[in-house]
Structure formats: structure tokens, C-alpha cells
Image (tube, rainbow, N blue to C red):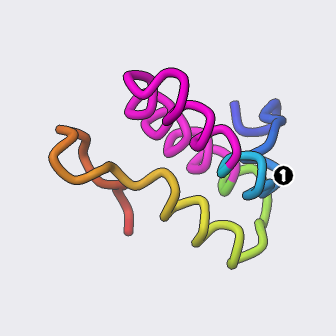
Amino acid sequence: LPGGLTGRVARGDVSSVEHHLRLLAQRAPEMLDLYRRLGRDVLRLAREKSAMEPAAVARLEALFEPVKDSGEEPMKGR
């Protein structure tokens, strides 16, 4: 599965993910938890696929962290 992964997270495109989160917060805040949950899984797969820039990984992990009191679970393996 990791070998077929493409997209912003797989490329370490932090600015696009930040933009997505801003837009979701404005237009569909109810989707933020889902976006973060999926982002955590995609990031895990992306790291299995290839070496990523450590700074990008750290920033993406921070962006995908659950929001306090949202009921989400933190990233595993940290």
C-alpha cells in the first residue's frame, strides 16, 4: 500500500496541508477531526514508503495532532 501513495502528505507539502486546515476551519469545521485522523494514517504510510524530510514530518505530525477535547486519539508510535 505505501508504494502507491501520492499526494501532498507523501511529498511533505506542509503549506498545502496548512491551507487545507485553514479552509476546513472556516467552511467545514466538522470535518477537521476526520482530516487529521486520515492525515495521521497517510503520514504513517508515507514514512513507510520513503525517507521524508525530518522537519516536514515533525510539522505534519503537529498539524495532524488531535485537538484537545475533540475525542481524537494521539498519534501512535511517538
Q: Is residue 31 above or below residue 52?
A: above
Query: Viewer-proximal residue, 63 or 48?
Result: 63
Name the quadrant of the N terminus: top right
The C terminus - image quarter:
bottom left
Range of the magenta residues?
A: 19-46
* Residue 67 screen position, x and y as percent: 30, 50
* Circle 1 SS class: helix
Is residue 17 left or right of 41 when viewed as pictured?
right
Q: Where is residue 24 in the image (x, y as percent from the top left)?
A: 55, 31
Determine the residue positioned at 75% across, 50% down: 49
Q: Quadrant of residue 50?
A: bottom right
**Of 54 and 21, which appears nearest the observer?**
21
Question: Is residue 42 rendered magenta in the image?
Answer: yes
Q: Which residue lies furthest to the front in this view?
A: 26
> Callout 1: 10 Å neighbours few (<14), some, many (20+)?
some
User: Would residue 64 be found to the left or right of residue 73 on screen?
Assistant: right
Q: What residue do we see at 47% from left, 40% from top?
A: 36
Q: Position of residue 54 (x, y in %)?
A: 69, 77
Q: Is residue 29 left or right of residue 14?
A: left
The residue under label 1 is 11
Q: What residue is shown at x 62% (from left), y 34% (from top)? A: 23
| Dominant SS in magenta | helix
Can you say whether 35 is above or below 19 in the image?
A: above
- The residue at 71%/38% (across/down) is 2
**Number of marks in picture:** 1
- Is 19 located above or below residue 50 in the figure? above
- Is residue 56 part of the magenta span, yes or no? no
- Is 59 positioned to the left or the right of 62 in the image? right
Tell me the quarter of the picture where residue 7 sits.
top right
Residue 8, x across and y down, in percent: 79, 43
User: At label 1, which amino acid type do we have?
Assistant: Arg
